[in-house]
Structures are given as C-alpha cells and as structure tokens.
C-alpha cells in the first residue's frame, strides 16, 4: 500500500469515527454516558500505547498520572473551591510532569522487566500515600465526591450529558491527533527505532535515554488529561484511580485493542467498557471474561482488534499489501 | 508495649514470613530458572485454600484438605506451564507477567463463582486449636506450628537443592540453561516439574495459612504483591536469602501494622523501588538477569 | 425480558389513551401495568456482603408478602453487585438510573460508598433509600430531599450506649477499635461522645486499614488499665476474627467488651462463642428474643421461607422494614412513583410499626426515627441469648458533627 493510500485510509477511518461520534448524543442517555466513558478511557490507553506500542517500554504505573490529575481536580475544585478548568489543567499537568520527570529519570535506567516491576512498586507507594498519610487531603478510602462539571469561565455550560460528551470528544480528538503527529514525525520514527533495536539507535548516535524520557513524560501528560476528564465525568474520585490494577487494565485494553496502532486504544476501551458496564448487567464475571479475551489475544491474535480490522480491510480491498 | 506482647508480634511476623516463604520459594525458582514472573501464583495460593476448605467440609479431615489444596495448586501450575508459559519463554519478560496477570483474574472470578464473595474462615485442626501460656500470655499454638512447618519445608527444599541430583539439575538450569541442555538435560521437563513444585507449595501455603489469613476473593492479589516484593528484594538463586527476606518482610508487615499502620505498606514498596534501582539483583541475588 | 416490557408498554399506551379520553382528567399510572422499578445497589461480594444479603432476605420476604405488587402495579427489582467498592457502587448507581431507569435507587451497607452514591443521586434527582446499613453521618447530612435512610445513623444507638457504659456499667476508661473509614469511625466517635459526656474517658483509639483480617497487631497496641473496648468492624467474618482473637489472646480476662449489635448477633457470634459471650452489653435496634407480635409473625414467616439454617437476625428485620416502609409510602400515593415529589413527601409522612420498634418514621433530614435497645447476653434456660435491659424510645439522628471523628 502506498503512502497516499495509507493516508487516505487513515483519514477515512477518522472521518467514519468522527461522523459516528458526532451522532452519539441522539442515542439514549446511558449510551452517551458509556460513549463519554469510552472516550476518556481511550485517551488513557493511548497514553500507555504511546509508551509501550511505540517505544517498547511496558509500564504498570500509568494510573499514577491518571489518578494524580483526577485528585488535583477533586481536591482543588471540591475542597479548595478553585474551579476554573484551565487553571486546574495547568496545575494538574504540572503535578503530572513533576512526578514523571522525577520518577522517569530513575525508572528508565532499568531494563524492560524491571522497569515494569519498578513502575508497579512506585504506583503502589503512591496509592498508599493517598490512602493513609495524605488522608487529610484526599479523604482516603472514602474519596472525594460532588465534583462538578468543568467551569470553562465562558458562557458555555457543560452540565448536560451531551454537552460534556462533546467537550470530551474535542479533547480526545486533539489527543489522538497529537499522537498521530508525534508518531509520524522524525521523533516518532526514532522512538520506534528504539523499540525495535535500541543498540542500533545508540550506535547511530541517538541519545536513546532522552527519547525514552520525553516519551515517558508525554505519556504521563496524556494520562493526566484523561484522569482530569474522568474526575469531571464521574463526580467521585477515590484511591482506586491510583491503584496498579488500573494500570494493569490499561495494558489489557492496549493489547486487546491492538498494540502500537492509532485506533487500538479506542477498540480496547470499547471492549473493556462494554464488558464492565454492559455485560456486567448479565453476569458478574465480566472481569474474568475480559481476562480470557486478553489471554486469547496475547496467544493467538497479537494484533488485537485493530489488527483484526486491518486484516479484514486488506481482505476486502483485495490482494496483498504491505503494512 | 509489654514484653510478652512484643514477642507475640515478632512470632506473628515470623509465622507470616513462613507463609510468604511457601509462596516466594516457588516464585523465585520460576523467575530464576525460566525468567518468568508468575502473577498467578497468588491465585494458586487462594484456590489451594478454597479447595482445602471444601475438602475439609466434605470429609472433616484436615490432612486430606492440605493434600487436596496442594494438589490443586500443582494441577493449576501444570496447566499454566503446559498451555501458557511454553508460548512465552524467550519472549520479552513482560509477556509472562501480562499473561499470568490475566490468568489470575480468570482464576479469581472462577473462585468467586465456586465459592461466592463471602469471606470464609478455616478452624485450625482440633489438636492445634489451643493457646498455651507464653511469658504469661496465651499464644495460639497454630501459629507456632506454621513456623515449624516453614522451617521444615525450608530444610527439605535446601537438602533437595544441594544434595540431590534433581536439585543439581535445577541449579544447573538456573545458572546456565544452554549448557545444561548441552549436557543432555531435558530442560522442558525440568521447567514443568519446577512449576508444579512451586505451585504445589503455593496451594499448600494457601490452606495452612487459612486459619491465620482467612480466605477471601482478593487474597490472591494481596499475597502476590508481597511475594513479588520478596523475590525482588531478596533476589533469586539463594534459598536462604529467600527465607531471610521473607522473614524480614513478614516482620516489617506485622510490626509495621502495630507501630506505624499508615506507613507500613508504603515503606515495604519504597524498599522495593530502591532495591530495583540500586541493586536489581536483590540483596542476596546472584546474577542480574 | 425485553419482549415482555415491550408488550407491557403497548398495553400501557393503549390504556392511557383510553383513560385520557374519559372526562376525568386523572393521569394516574395505576391504569397502566407498567412496573415500579426499584434498583438495588448492594454488596453481594466483599467484606460487607453478609449484611446486605441478609437484608435482601428481609426485603424478599416483604415482596413475597405483597405478591410483588403495589397498588396494582408489579414491582421490578433490579439488583447489581457493588463488590463493597465505592467506585463500583457509583457505576452501579449510574447503570441503574441511566440504563435501567429505576424509579427508586436503594443502597446497601457500605457507608463510604453510600456517600459517593448520594452525590450521584442528588445530581440525577432520583430518590435514594438506604436499606441495609450505611450508618455514617455524611450519608444523610447535610440533608437533601432525595436522600433517605431507613436503617440507622451513627450515634442513634452509640450515644445512649456510651452513656449506659459510663453510668450503669461503671466503665471509667475505654478503648475504641475499628477500621479507618467513615462507617466505623463515625460509630466510634459517637460512642466516645456519649461515654465522655457521662464522665468516662477514652484512653485510646486504634484504627487500621479496612479489610484487614488479622487483629493481633492491633490488640498488641492495647494499653494496660483499660476497662472495656468498644469496637466496630463491618462484616461478620471480620467480627468473628476479632472476637476469636480476643479470646485467643486471653483478653477476656482483662478487658470487657461493650459493643454494637453486630458483635452480639444471636445468629452468629452467640452461636459461635456461646457461653464465652455471656455478660457482654450491646446496643441494638432488633433482638430476636424481644417479644412483640410483629417479631413473632415475621420470625415465623422467615423460617417458613428460609428454613432453620440461619437464625432470624437484625439485618433481615431492617431489610424487611425498609421495603415495607417504601411499600407503605407507595401505597399512600396509589403507586404513582413517577411523581417524585409526592413519593418523597409520602416517605416523610409515613409511619409504621417496626419489628421491635413501636414506631418507625423519617425525620426532617431523611433519616429514620426508631426505638433502640440496650441488651445483655445472658443464659436463659440453657440458651445463650440477648435479653433487653433498657429501651431508648424514638431516637433521631444526632446533629451534624456529633459523629465525625476529628481529622476525618
């Protein structure tokens, strides 16, 4: 497949998603809620995807940034009365950048498997901190509730389901666009080079550490944005948002959706949310089902849903193509 | 704190450390030999406990229950190794973590289905269900029994590892797989055997630990985290090192709860982070992998 | 299920059309057979599941009694498991309200989760009724017209029990013990208020993370020279652990227990520990041995439906009373639950006889007003059971701030 055909494919896919996305609020209320949840989760998963799919680093610590940003929104807007969205965004991103900058310097020094374990351990430390020592601020297990919808400081209200959905849609689109541009840029190609063969990149003169570091911080920022949106969406934040199991969920969604692809995170978020919110009405074992799907994907369908879809597209467009 | 109470807490910490050892020994061996981190290990522990409970309820025999629990662990270990782990040897280490993570989720929901979400308890067997006077205060005999069992298991494993041919084969495999294969050792068989042994110990630990820890869905996650911390901090390749780390962590966890509950869990994992960053091979570990 | 709902809807439409044509101007939903949907956000798994599942047995008993119909409309109960997890509780509430479109959102046991779900119910403007426990103060205070609690509020029992412990039992120094979450610390602090106001002194407060099963480290922190412990832990198994280790460590020889009713339940701890529990004083809203006609009747029906495996207990009583109260309110508005204002007003003005309590009603803040009892475990005719010593009639929720432990 040529470069242009590839580009047209991406644009058409984006247009299809976009068209569907715009129509969502016409559906019943619960569908809008689910769609919003899926979008927010997909941003979170794409942050993990940026890190893993494009640089090969597997982190069990993405929840740190999701949760920290969510708590910033919760604590400042509910307990301190600061509600301006842009101000909160600034603070949340600063917090997230600080944590990732600090931790990244340390964590990136260790190899793949140990990187995963150290991010898990650090994530657990952060969770513990939110649960107990910082309980006075975070309210610990009880959590913080009554988080209102974002206050943009403009005359637009975001309280209704549909209004908030569009807000999230815009932000999600921007995030996906950003990731798309980054991965298609020289920086992105360097990242993928590091994923495929770090030694060669080093031999070529690249400062691989710097590339990994910047990607780590970028993925933290995107996870943070998702976390902020979640706080607004859910209206309630508790330490579960920082728990390493949530980081694990991100990895599962990433694999199920299709690692290293642009739309994979969206598919993964769709599968997960569908299971958690919909299938859970019919069986309480939805998480076990997700586990089974994940195992099947890892063992047999390594491309995930996105890979499967791409395969279908290839078959439909007839003939062989190199992707 | 009174002296006798302090001593009681130390004993509790040691008993808990022994339970951790039952779990960490297998985990450490799997990591050392096969380079896999088996997050489902905690699930073997929990399922072993539940299966033992069911057998106890059906037959009234504590010994049969122990056997059953351990056997169920071994069985799950066998299934895991045969059908899942084989496919991910040699791939990136994180594949094994993710796969076993998913597996533990499936096992957890399966346990939920079979045993419901109500937490359960196991009474210690009649002959151990008493407290005897210890420095003026009663101390439950069962916990002392756990310590004894842990020591026994350690001795058996140590002798096995150092003094038997099988042990030598396993040690050879840990040190240098290629060489061992070159010498004609059937490595895949060794892998399966080690996996089953580790899981056997886990299932065993799950049931004998039940009178102390109880059985509830979520126990698998809680216990695997500590076991993982042991393997990381203690390093692999040294059985005494593993035991020592288990005792240290068991004591930290128990004494931490008594003295600084807000910071106990946090401290343990901070130590894990620091060890990983400073000396990834662990305190007693041999080689970096 | 979907098909049935579809045909019911069509019938309803037809019926409404017919009615509208009549020159009466009534728009009662009674004419349609559209079910009244009651959503249950309850703990089916996790540490607090026993309480909620017991309450479920209670409300199922009531539904069976009324043949699942109120004012001619069928009742549809939609239950989801919130796993004793506040985050899942909020998701379940969202699902019940937005997907299943329930008319009433009922909640189970977990206080922390109830507080979180309350935030959602207020936003969604759906009546929320607590039916199993969830006693923390912040569940109903500050008051919101949509939030109602049928069970009890922290302090309704503890203030009187604390006073009783100081005045009648003669305890001078006590220790509070419990997990570190609102549902527990609220009760502990309320007891403290009652106890200290009557001259007692709380020497120590020992708290630990929710879900911990091993109590030994926490008992280890007990200082000497203390008369009794007032503990609160959610979940029967955890309570069992606590009492088990209390005896195991020989503490019964040194410190007494003065407890919440969950620690002296006839069906559970008294069955397990029998004679060892004799003498323990506790506060409760229900005692199986307390002889009232309602209790007798309900107990008979309970055993008829569920058999003798599990003894009749206070959670079952509360589940039954909660649903009966809702049923009563619904009946008074002829089942027109769609008129939320009318339903809420009916809930506030309903009064009914409780299983033990002379009367159950709702105060201005949406919390229940009922009788409470001080009782003691005694051995009567060879049976270890609770015997009521004192009645505290018609207690309301204590004012705001009474049960929020400083720093929480």
Image (cartoon, grey):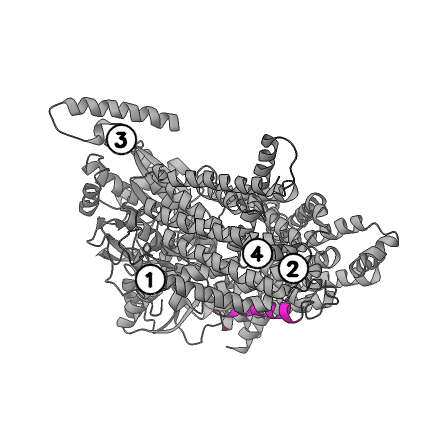
Tell me if residue C212 can be seen.
no
Tell which tag, 3 or 2, sits nearer the viewer: 2
Could you tell me which residue is drawn at 29 percent across and 42 percent down? C104
- Label 4 marks a residue whose chain is A
Residue C338 magenta:
no
- Is residue B274 magenta-colored? yes
Q: Is residue C359 left or right of residue A32?
A: left
Viewer-nearest of discs 1 and 3 = 1
Q: Position of residue C259 (x, y in %)?
A: 37, 61
Q: List the residue tagged with mark 1.
A: A77
Report, in whole angstroms, how far the alpha carbon at label 4 lies from the one at label 1. Answer: 30 Å
Which is closer to the viewer, label 4 or label 3?
4
Q: Nearer the viewer, residue C200 or C96?
A: C96
Q: CA distance from mark 3 to mark 2?
A: 62 Å
Label 1 and label 3: CA atoms lie apart by 44 Å
Provide residue C129's location: percent of width, then percent of height: 29, 47
Look at the picture and state if C352 lies above or below A189. above
Q: CA distance from mark 2 to mark 4?
A: 12 Å
Which residue is the site of mark 3? C73
Which labelled disc corresponds to residue A51? 4
Tag 3 subunit: C
Within 10 Å of disc 2 (Cα), the crowding (few <14, some 14-19, many 20+) is some
According to the image, label 2 marks what residue?
A112
Give me the C-alpha separation between circle 1 and circle 2.
Answer: 38 Å
Q: Earlier in the sequence, mark 4 or mark 1?
A: 4
Q: What residue range appears in magenta?
A: B260-289
Which chain is indicated by disc 2? A
């Amino acid at each position: 497949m040529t470069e242009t055909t590839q580009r047209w494919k991406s644009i058409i896919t984006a247009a299809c998603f976009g068209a569907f996305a715009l129509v969502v609020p016409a559906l019943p209320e619960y569908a809008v809620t689910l769609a919003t949840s899926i979008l927010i989760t997909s941003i979170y998963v794409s942050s993990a995807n940026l890190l893993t799919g494009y640089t090969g680093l597997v982190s069990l610590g993405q929840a740190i940034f999701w949760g920290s940003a969510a708590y910033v929104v919760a604590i400042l807007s509910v307990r301190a009365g600061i509600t301006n969205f842009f101000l909160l965004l600034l603070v949340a991103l600063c917090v997230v950048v600080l944590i990732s900058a600090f931790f990244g310097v340390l964590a990136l020094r260790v190899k793949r498997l140990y990187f995963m374990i150290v991010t898990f351990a650090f994530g657990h430390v952060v969770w513990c901190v939110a649960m107990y020592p910082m309980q006075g601020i975070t309210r610990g297990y009880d959590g913080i509730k009554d988080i209102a919808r974002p206050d943009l400081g403009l005359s637009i209200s975001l309280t209704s389901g549909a209004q908030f959905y569009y807000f999230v849609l815009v932000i999600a689109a921007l995030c996906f666009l950003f990731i798309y541009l980054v991965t298609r840029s020289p920086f992105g190609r360097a990242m993928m080079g590091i994923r495929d063969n770090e030694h060669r990149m080093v031999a070529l003169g690249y400062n691989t550490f710097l590339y990994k570091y910047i990607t780590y911080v970028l993925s933290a920022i995107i996870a943070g944005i998702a976390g902020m949106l979640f706080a607004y969406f859910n209206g309630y934040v508790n330490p579960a948002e920082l728990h390493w199991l949530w980081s694990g969920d991100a990895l599962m969604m990433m694999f199920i959706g299709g690692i290293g692809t642009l739309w994979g995170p969206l598919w993964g978020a769709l599968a997960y949310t569908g299971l958690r919110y919909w299938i859970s009405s019919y069986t309480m074992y939805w998480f076990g089902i997700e586990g089974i799907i994940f195992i099947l994907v890892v063992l047999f369908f390594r491309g995930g849903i996105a890979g499967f879809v791409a395969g279908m597209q290839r078959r439909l467009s007839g003939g062989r193509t190199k992707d | 704190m009174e002296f006798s109470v302090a001593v009681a807490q130390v004993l509790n910490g040691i008993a808990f450390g022994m339970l951790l050892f039952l779990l960490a020994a297998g985990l450490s061996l799997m990591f050392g030999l096969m380079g896999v981190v088996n997050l489902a290990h905690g699930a073997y522990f929990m399922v072993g406990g539940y299966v033992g409970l069911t057998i106890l309820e059906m037959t009234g025999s504590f010994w049969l229950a122990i056997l059953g629990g351990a056997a169920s662990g071994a069985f799950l270990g066998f299934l895991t190794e045969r059908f899942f782990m084989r496919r991910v040897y040699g791939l990136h280490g994180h594949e094994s973590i993710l796969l076993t993570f998913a597996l533990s989720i499936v096992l957890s929901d399966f346990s939920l289905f079979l045993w419901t979400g109500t937490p359960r308890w196991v009474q210690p067997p009649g002959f151990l269900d008493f407290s005897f006077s210890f420095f003026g205060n009663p101390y439950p005999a069962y916990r002392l029994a756990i310590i004894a069992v842990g020591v026994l298991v350690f001795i058996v494993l140590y002798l096995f590892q150092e003094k038997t041919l099988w042990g030598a084969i396993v040690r050879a495999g840990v040190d240098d797989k290629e060489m061992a294969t070159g010498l004609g050792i059937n490595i895949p068989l060794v892998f399966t055997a080690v996996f089953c042994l580790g899981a056997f110990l886990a299932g065993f630990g799950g049931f004998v630990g039940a009178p102390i820890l109880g059985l509830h869905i979520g126990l698998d996650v809680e216990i695997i985290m500590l076991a993982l911390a042991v393997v990381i901090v203690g390093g692999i390749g040294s059985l005494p090192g593993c035991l020592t780390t288990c005792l240290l962590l068991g004591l930290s966890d128990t004494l931490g709860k008594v003295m600084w509950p807000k910071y106990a869990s946090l401290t343990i994992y901070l130590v894990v982070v620091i060890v990983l960053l400073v000396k990834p091979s662990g305190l007693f570990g041999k080689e970096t992998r | 299920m979907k098909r049935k709902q579809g045909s019911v809807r069509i019938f309803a439409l037809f019926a409404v059309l017919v009615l509208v044509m009549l020159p009466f101007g009534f728009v009662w939903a009674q004419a349609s057979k559209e079910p009244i949907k009651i959503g249950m956000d309850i703990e089916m798994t996790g540490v607090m599941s026993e309480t909620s599942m017991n309450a479920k047995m209670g409300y199922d008993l009531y539904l069976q009694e009324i043949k699942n119909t109120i004012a001619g409309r069928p009742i549809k109960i939609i239950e989801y498991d919130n796993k004793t997890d506040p985050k899942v509780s909020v998701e379940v509430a969202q699902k019940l309200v937005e997907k299943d479109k329930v008319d009433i959102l009922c909640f189970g046991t977990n206080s922390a989760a109830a507080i979180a779900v309350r935030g959602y119910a207020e936003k969604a403007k759906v009546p929320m009724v607590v039916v199993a426990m969830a006693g923390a103060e912040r569940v109903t205070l500050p008051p919101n017209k949509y939030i109602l609690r049928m069970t009890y509020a922290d302090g309704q029992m503890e203030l009187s029990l604390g006073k009783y412990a100081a005045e009648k039992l003669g305890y001078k120094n006590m220790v509070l013990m419990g997990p570190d979450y609102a549902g527990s610390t609220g009760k502990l602090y309320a007891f403290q208020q009652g106890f200290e106001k009557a001259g007692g002194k709380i020497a120590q407060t020992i708290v630990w993370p929710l879900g911990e099963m091993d109590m030994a480290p926490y008992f280890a922190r007990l200082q000497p020279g203390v008369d009794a412990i007032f503990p609160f832990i959610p979940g029967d198994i955890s309570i069992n652990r606590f009492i088990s280790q209390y005896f195991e460590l020989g503490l019964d020889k040194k410190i007494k227990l003065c407890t919440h009713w969950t620690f002296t339940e006839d069906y559970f701890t008294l069955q397990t520990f029998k004679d060892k529990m004799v003498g323990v004083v506790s506060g409760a809203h229900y005692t199986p041995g307390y002889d009232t006609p309602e209790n007798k009747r309900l107990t008979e029906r309970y055993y008829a439906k569920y058999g003798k495996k599990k003894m009749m207990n206070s959670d079952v009583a509360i589940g039954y009373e909660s649903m009966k109260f809702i049923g009563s309110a619904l009946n008074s508005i002829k089942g027109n639950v769609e008129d939320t204002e009318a339903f809420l007003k009916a809930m506030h003005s309903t009064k009914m006889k409780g299983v033990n309590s002379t009367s159950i009603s709702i105060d201005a803040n949406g919390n229940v007003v009922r009788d409470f009892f001080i009782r003691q475990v005694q051995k009567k005719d060879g049976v270890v059971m609770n015997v009521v010593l004192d009645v505290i009639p018609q207690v309301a929720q204590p004012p705001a701030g009474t049960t929020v432990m400083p720093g929480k």
